[in-house]
């Protein structure tokens, strides 16, 4: 965060689960002494979607950027994404592409699956559905999206799904609003053995197929209705 070229940010840290060791790490790196950093913990381990939504409820900034604990933002990320939203006032979200950050420090670039530029309403959801079942990730990395707060609240925050909560939220947002895709990396997605996405235990809640069906049905219904209004209600 300190490497960001855009200096005007507030970092809301929401600790999911036991907090003592994490608070010690935050103190050691100087985060607790930085006035731009807000730290909270809810005590129990609830998973990414709940932790993000608890933090979201405490945020008042007009732009929201999620950052998972094991990932990094590229130094120009906040400036580039907020600049894109300023240039496209009707867009509800902006994203760049992600580079995989491996344990040896190397960065692997994955080409964008769709052209950079303005994203028409519904474009991401349609492209994602067309690529199933061979490819289950959306055309842009859902963990690196910058949202307008009003759109994210309209969606109800991150979806109550397992492992695809950010995919569901991005595709629902795409079904409601236009977006902007930048042709530059904004997220460093860390690859390591302890990733939640690499957990091998069997999920007995219907598997990915039922979750993908829910995501598509929700996006379809949202697209069939009126677009996101794009303004502050109060």
Image (cartoon, rainbow, N blue to C red):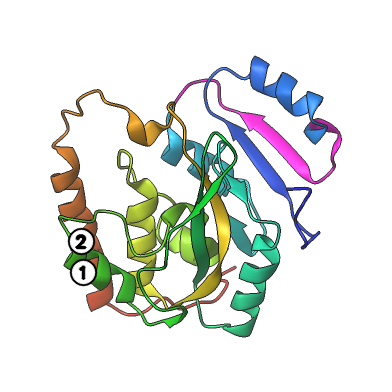
Left or right of 135 on screen, residue 66: right
Spatial separation of the CA atoms under disc 2 and disc 1: 6 Å
The x, y position of residue 130, in whole percent, is: 18, 68
* Badge 2 vs badge 1, beta-carbon distance below 8 Å: yes
Q: Which mark is residue 216?
A: 2
Judge whether 81 appears above or below 213 on screen.
below
Q: Residue at x 43, y 63 (%)?
A: 154
Q: Residue at x 41, y 68 (%)?
A: 112
The x, y position of residue 21, in whole percent, is: 66, 16
Left or right of 141 on screen, residue 72: right
Q: Which residues are magenta?
A: 32-45
For numbered disc 2, what is the local secondary structure? helix
* Of 33 and 201, the residue lying toward us: 201
Q: Read off the residue under disc 1.
A: 220
Q: Tell me if residue 140 is in the magenta stretch.
A: no
Is residue 145 visible in the rendered structure shown here? no
* Of 105 and 25, the residue lying toward us: 105
Numbered-mark total: 2
Q: Tell me if residue 37 is in the magenta stretch.
A: yes
Q: Residue at x 70, y 67 (%)?
A: 79
């Amino acid at each position: 965060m300190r490497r960001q070229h855009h200096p005007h940010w507030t970092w809301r840290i929401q600790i999911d689960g036991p907090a003592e060791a994490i608070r010690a790490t935050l103190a050691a790196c100087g985060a607790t002494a930085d006035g731009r950093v807000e730290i909270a913990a809810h005590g129990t381990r609830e998973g990414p979607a709940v932790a993000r939504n608890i933090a979201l409820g405490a945020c008042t900034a007009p732009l929201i950027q999620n950052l998972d604990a094991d990932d990094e933002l590229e130094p120009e990320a906040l400036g580039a994404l907020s600049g894109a939203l300023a240039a496209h006032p009707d867009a509800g979200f902006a994203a760049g592409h992600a580079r995989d950050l491996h344990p040896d420090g190397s960065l692997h670039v994955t080409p964008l699956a769709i052209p950079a530029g303005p994203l028409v309403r519904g474009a991401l959801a349609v492209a994602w559905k067309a690529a199933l079942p061979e490819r289950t990730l959306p055309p842009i990395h859902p963990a690196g999206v910058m949202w307008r707060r009003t759109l994210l609240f309209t969606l109800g925050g991150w979806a109550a799904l397992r492992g695809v909560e950010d995919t569901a939220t991005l595709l629902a947002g795409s079904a409601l609003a236009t977006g902007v895709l930048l042709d530059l990396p904004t997220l460093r997605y860390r690859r390591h053995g302890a990733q939640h996405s690499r957990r091998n235990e069997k999920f007995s809640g219907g598997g990915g197929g039922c979750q993908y069906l829910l995501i598509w049905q929700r996006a379809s219904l949202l697209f069939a209705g009126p677009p996101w209004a794009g303004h502050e209600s109060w």
